[in-house]
Amino acid sequence: MHSTGTTIERRVALARRAGGPEVIEVAVETLPEPGPGEALVRVAAAGLNHADSLIRSGGYVVTMPFPLAVGVEAAGTVVAAGDGAAIAPGTRVCGTGWLGSCADHVVVPVERIVPIPDDLGFAEAASIAHAGAAAGALSRVWPLEGRRAAVWGAAGAVGRLLVTRLSGNGTEVIGIAGGERVAVPARLGAAHVVDRTAGDVAEHVREATGGRGVDAVFDPVAAATFHTSLAMLAPRGCLINYGQLGGGVTNAALGDLFTSGGTFVTKFNAGAYVDGFADVAGLIREALELAVRRPEVVTPVAARFPLSEAAAAYRALESGAAGKVLVVVEDG
């Protein structure tokens, strides 16, 4: 970073146009110094998320102008604060909604900043901020205390936190996972675990519920799992889709909801379940505190890349890395 007194030069990963990871390059751009209520953060680690890739590809429900500074989640250290920003330089912080976080520095509103507990490092914080906010908001979508829910990707970043939150609030959770991570959901509080690679997932979920099905399914996959998710729902249950790792759903009809028992389908919009960024910060804070008590809720880091290799980092994410992919920012 180079400061001229009123502006800062930073290195940042930019997508020049819509497309795959190949459109990402690291550039130097001018960043205004923090204004009132803002802080300048030196990024230590940026967490990559599938929503980043969807937005960059141009195929998401939310569109952004290009060139686009990529990334929304990071952890680092406050360098400077603008007028009225109640955060001290030197404070270790993390957050989500940090637009253009895949950079060596970022200016963000202080309401989007959460201090990192002493017992957690930058990598853990950058792995849990976005997932913590998402899991917290997802847990508000459908009333589930004393009821049953199935969680796809129960060993993933959001899934781990969701299983823990739901089971801790009186929900009987069925965690769906696969491969080496199939044992993870039980350690997090899932009452039952279904191996997604071992036969008919919906049938196994129904067996675990005595044939009735679950009251909600949390599904980040979409097209590849949509009809399977409907098949595991109890009458009047809800399919909560919060991603499209398997592509957008194009082969569904209202009749499917009739035949599956008068079920509901909702496309999760986090903004509809939080009361501004202060609420988001509170959810992240809860996730960080949970991670201190129960480190297993933090998904392991699958790969680390320097900022200069941001495109390669996104290629790793999009190839299905089992764990968190981080961009670790070099000094300079």
Image (cartoon, helix red, strand yellow):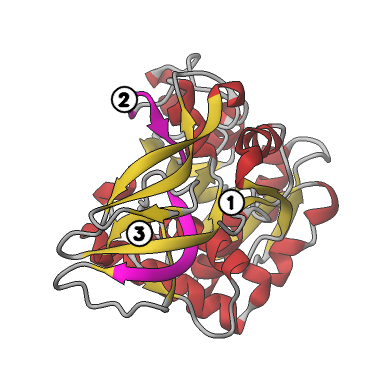
Q: Which residue is mark 3?
A: 140
Describe residue 79's horizontal placement relative to residue 295 as left or right.
Answer: left
* Residue at x 45%, y 38% (from the top left corner): 28
Q: Quadrant of residue 329?
A: bottom right
Q: Position of residue 176 (x, y in %)?
A: 68, 49
Q: Which residue is mark 2?
A: 65
| Front residue of this view, candidates 124 and 84 | 84
Q: Which residue is mark 1?
A: 151
* Residue at x 71%, y 39% (from the top left corner): 201
Quadrant containing the C terminus is bottom right
Instruction: Classify mark 1: helix, strand or loop.
Output: strand
Tell me the amino acid under the disc marked 3. Arg
Q: Is residue 162 visible?
A: no
Q: Quadrant of residue 89?
A: bottom left
The CA distance from mark 2 to mark 1 is 34 Å
Number of other residues with Cα within 10 Å of mark 2, as a class: few under 14, some 14 to 19, many 20 or more:
few
What mark, if any, has residue 81 been given in the picture?
Answer: none
Tell me the amino acid under the disc marked 1. Val
Q: Is residue 261 visible?
A: yes
Mark positioned earlier in the residue sequence (2 or 1): 2
The CA distance from mark 3 to mark 2 is 31 Å
Instruction: Classify mark 3: helix, strand or loop.
Output: loop
Q: Position of residue 134 (x, y in %)?
A: 43, 54
Describe residue 298's horizontal placement relative to residue 138 as left or right.
Answer: right
Mark 2 or mark 1, whichever is nearer to me: 2
Mark positioned earlier in the residue sequence (3 or 1): 3
The CA distance from mark 3 to mark 1 is 14 Å
Tell me the amino acid under the disc marked 2. Pro
